[in-house]
Image (cartoon, grey):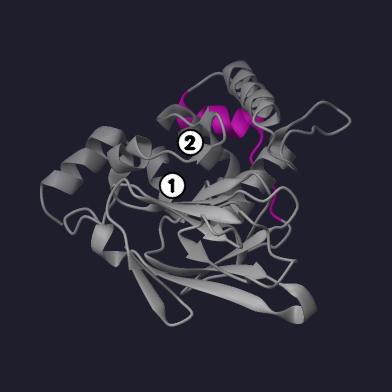
Amino acid sequence: MVVIHGGRRWTLTTGDLATFGRAETCTIRIGVADDHVSRHAGTLQVLDDCVLVRNESRTRPLAFAPATGGRRRVEPGEGMSSLPHDRFSVVVSGAFGDRYELRVDASEILPVDLAPFPGPTRLARHALATGELRLTAGELRLLAALCEPVLRGTDDDAGPATYRAIAVRTGLRPGHVATVFHGLRRQLSDAGVTGAAGREPDGDVRGRLAEWALRTGTVTREHLLLLDDWQALDARRSGGR
């Protein structure tokens, strides 16, 4: 992975972690004289096939800006995977409208044989880590079913799927789906993730979970592959396209 900022270039390999912020100890120093920038603004960690972007600030949000697609807000304490994007920028806001941009090219860490068709194994192996929370493949699959109407729909008012619809889509019981989502809500709360731990007055947590999953990029259209037959997907991935 290559990171470019202020005319300088940093190269990282799988497993490396780069810190950025005002502090002298940061790998990449930004906004040295700008008090609006956190001393430890965030980190970039190189995984096998993506980059984990984390906001280490206590008060300041970051912006994840892919080369294509809309910008996403990363709240303090939150993390997100760069998937499915291999080129993106991380933008830190400073005082008086100043912006500090780290341009990232992660195209070299995407396995060539899997890039056109990632498949569920790859998605499960690098589930998004958020604080102490690490999503399993099964949890990602349920979140994908939850967000499917929003990701596939053309209606701007499309909302998250119902428990019954998710159960039909995944072959599980509605009660099991609800139990998993309430467990995720508790884990997010314990991990200090803001904006995802609340619930609606009727006790439903679907809306908050869907909003968090889509806003952070935890679930994208790529993850809808998890809703198809896994054996068929693996056969397609290994048997030629």
Give x and y (percent) for residue 48: 28, 47
Q: Which residues are magenta?
A: 158-171
The reply to whether residue 9 is visible in this rendering is yes
Residue at the disc numbered 2: 140
Q: Is residue 60 above or below residue 230?
A: below
Give the residue type at disc 1.
His
Magenta stretch encompasses residue 52: no
- Badge 2: residue crowd in 10 Å (few <14, some 14–19, many ≥20): many
Residues marked 1 and 2 touching at CB (< 8 Å): yes
Residue positioned 59% across, 34% down in the render: 165
- The one of 198 and 207 positioned closer to us in this rendering: 198
Q: Which residue is farthest right? A: 201
Horizontal arrangement in the rendering, residue 119 relative to residue 170 (left or right): left
* SS assignment at label 2: helix
Q: Is residue 200 above or below residue 84?
A: above
Specify the quadrant of the image occupied by residue 35. Answer: bottom right
Give x and y (percent) for residue 87: 40, 69
Residue at the disc numbered 1: 223
- Quarter of the rendering occupied by the N terminus: bottom left
Q: Is residue 21 above or below residue 162?
A: below
- Quarter of the rendering occupied by the C terminus: bottom left
Give x and y (percent) for residue 6: 48, 80
* SS assignment at label 1: helix
- Badge 1: residue crowd in 10 Å (few <14, some 14–19, many ≥20): many
Specify the quadrant of the image occupied by residue 15. Answer: top left
Give the residue type at disc 2.
Leu
